[in-house]
Amino acid sequence: MATLNSLADRLRFEIGDTGKSFVYQVIADGVTNRYLIPYSPLDGANLMVYVDNVDTSNAATVEELTGYVTFDDIPEAGAVLVFSGTYYRYFVDSEICQFVDTAFGQHIANHADAYGRGYTLASLPGIEEYPVVVYASTLALYTLATDASFDIDITAPDGVQIPRSERYRQLMQMIEERKQQYRELCSMLGVGLYKIDVFTLRRTSKTTNRYVPVYLPQEVDDRSMPQRALLSMPSYGSAISPSDVPTFDLTMYQGDSFEVELDFPFDITGYNFKSEIRPQPGLPTLLATFVVTPVVGSNSKVTLTLSSDETGNLPERCYWDIQATTESDPTYQKTYMRGNVFVTPEVTM
């Protein structure tokens, strides 16, 4: 399972920006509370600061990019200040994580897993971790190239030349190599920005001006309910209505009893909850109704349960939500959560 930290470590290895340890000592002058560590950029979160062998890390502010450390109070004159930690060659941790986040977001854009869910770092297949790191290294090299683009060649009167722009040219050459590497990986693995997708042309009914639904193909002996393909539709410039209802997907196994606990950020005393499952939002067909039970000893948690018979009748994909009414106000009704229901077909019946 990929994590932001694991991908960040791999990115540092790819661009040669692994951390190096250091210990720096200086004597306080009793005048200033701001000292420069000659190692930067720094890992500020793990920097250890000692004043006469006393840990004062929490009483100091670190500027990771410049290497300056500012104490809350001015250390006494003659005090021994010791700084111990890790420094890097190019980037601080926040910048590395930003490169990874950007590369990951672009890599998985408009792609979903086998269940139609958007990818997260935790669900990213292991085989796609390296392409994400390669793409993130391209973004990091672009940043270095931007900095190098401000360097100019130096020509001395005695004929000595220092081609400082050569660093920019080398970085741009490396960027092209990395981009080609990412393109080849994605093309051969069928992932990322260069994944080959298969689409079905949508037809619009001339009588109703509605899209003709497209259903996912099924095996010849598959008698389960057909699953509609949820295809993206053009907005034609129209604004998309936002929703303030959070999304929470449920995953269950067909024919097994199901139970999930929901925790609300408020006191639910006096609330009556109702939760249903339907094939599509807005359809009158009711597939199942959850039994909503308050959790004993808690005033903010409820348990949703389904019997094995109810889950046995569910298709592989459907939809649910949970609504609440109050005993004090019969006109009040609010939907607090919604989402997909993914059902794995059973084998043992």
Image (cartoon, helix red, strand yellow):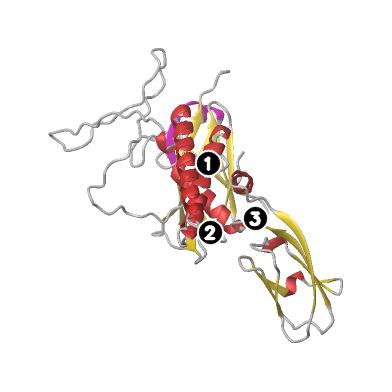
Which of pointers 1 and 3 lies earlier in the amino acid sequence? 1
Q: Which residues are magenta?
A: 308-321
Query: To which residue does mark 1 refer?
Result: 134
Residue that badge 2 annotates: 270
State the quadrant of the C terminus: top right
Height in image: 251 above or below 215? below
User: How many angstroms separate mark 1 from mark 2 (CA)?
Assistant: 54 Å
Is 245 above or below relative to 188? below
Q: Position of residue 188 (x, y in %)?
A: 46, 27
Horizontal side of 80 relative to 277 (left or right) equals: right
Looking at the picture, does residue 81 appear above or below residue 207? Answer: below
Depth check, front residue: 341 or 16: 16
Label 2 residue SS = loop
Report x, y in % for residue 204: 19, 34
Q: Given the image, on which type of amino acid does mark 3 rest?
A: Ser
Residue 322: in sight, yes or no?
A: no
Q: CA distance from mark 3 to mark 2?
A: 13 Å
Which residue: 49% across, 32% down?
185
Residue type of the residue flagged with mark 2: Gly
Mark 3 element type: loop
Which residue is at the front of the view, 207 or 149? 149
Q: How many marks?
A: 3
The nearer-to-camera label among 1 and 3 is: 1
Residue occupying image coordinates x 60% and y 43%: 14
Crowdedness of circle 2 by 10 Å Cα count: few (<14), some, many (20+)?
A: few
- In front: label 1 or label 2: 1
Specify the quadrant that holds the N terminus: top right
Residue 233 to residue 229: above or below? below
Instruction: Give, as a three-letter code, the residue at label 1.
Output: Val
Tell whether 172 sits left or right of 232.
Answer: right
**Is 1 positioned to the left or the right of 155 in the image?**
right
